[in-house]
Amino acid sequence: MAGSRSIGRLLVGGLALAAAGWALKDIPAELGGRAKGERLERMRRSPQFHDGLFRNSTPGVFVPSPQSAREIAWNMLHNREERRPATPVPVVTAPAGGPSPTGLSVIWYGHATALLEIEGRRVLVDPVWSRRASPSQLVGPRRLHPMPGPLAGLPPLDAIMISHDHYDHLDRATVRGLLALQTAPFLVPLGIGAHLERWGVPASRIVELDWDEEVSVAGLRFVATAARHFSGRTLNRNVTLWGSWVIAGRERKVFYAGDSGYFDGYAGIGAAHGPFDLTLMPIGAYNVAWPDIHMNPEEAVNAHLDLGGRLLLPVHWATFTLSTHPWAEPVDRLWREAKARDVRLAVPRPGERVDTADVPLLESWWELLRGGETGRRPRQPPLPPSPRL
């Protein structure tokens, strides 16, 4: 009997190890590739590259203090109900209308993923279709709503644009799917081509740009512009570049901020490339512990105005829990600030098309989905023990 139990435990342990090995087998590939050869030499020539790493033009603090880290960890563990919607997020699976050959529209799929339809061309921005923003689909930030449609349901694309290599913006499974389903090139900041090549994307479909460099694709002009952020798919940070993008047609212009803290570079981008018919501005995942890498909603409005934006569409909220603020707080704050400063705003449901020439009256659909934040204060971490004298 004892021998049978031992054999059973060995079998269970072996199966558990095999399952863990299977689950972790793709992680080395998820981490991406490292630049070498001519790609690395080009990176070294970049004005943003110093002492082996890319740097922000406006330095900042990116590591929370020990006390801030402790408070963040406490809130992540104890205030979960405030950071998710109370009921399912409404998703639009069949957006009304279609792209205009001369106009500008956008379909927001959730978080930072969006499909721009500009003068008859289609540009997919930071596509992430995976269930988690993580190197493993077993752990990490999980989607709070489904994608509005399958990757295979996308129309033919003219360009696929990436802002940086964090998991919530660059997803290996999605890249491999797009490689098989589409023929469009990938437009990326310097160094990210190494990730794509490791995942099977041919060099002929990769366009890597430094800040202030540009390329024409399918009649659209793409300019890689600055952002205040960082990069990295491992603990080694800033070995690839991050950035924002200008997308310009004959008459229409779009600015996509990617991830960024607020900085004075927005005014310069607006002066050089604006005004913009549409800005896609991140409004979520902010925290006082990292004010220099993610802007808050009020700063997003500031940046939109610096850029000369005409319509602001918020991204980087609602889909993944990446900070400690309540789920609906970013858009609530954005709405108040936009009204106070007379900023034109569109807040679509995931999958909903917005035509910049015919923006509907703003409907606060998110207010029906509030989580535990309504009428409650998040629990606070206990005070640290008093030092012994």
Image (cartoon, rainbow, N blue to C red):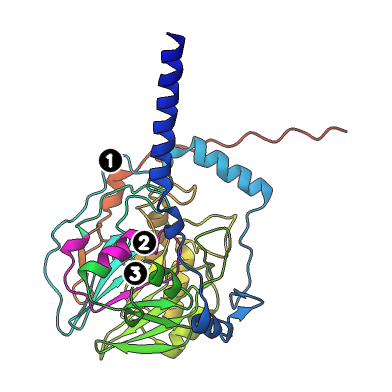
Closest to the observer, 28 or 186: 28
Q: Which mark sits nearer the N-terminus, 2 or 3?
A: 2
Sort mark 2 into few (<14), some (14-19) or many (20+) by Cα contacts within 10 Å.
many
- State yes or no: residue 174 in magenta: yes
Cα–Cα span, label 1 and label 2: 30 Å
Q: Secondary structure at mark 2?
A: helix
- The spot of residue 17 in percent (x, y) is 44, 36
Is label 1 or label 3 in front? 3
Which numbered disc covers residue 172? 2
- Name which residue lies at 49% across and 47% down: 324
Q: Which residues are magenta?
A: 151-178
- Name which residue lies at 52% across and 70% down: 262
- Name which residue lies at 40% across and 38% down: 18
Which numbered disc covers residue 200? 3
- The spot of residue 58 in percent (x, y) is 61, 75
Closest to the observer, 380 or 152: 152
- Name which residue lies at 16% across and 70% down: 155
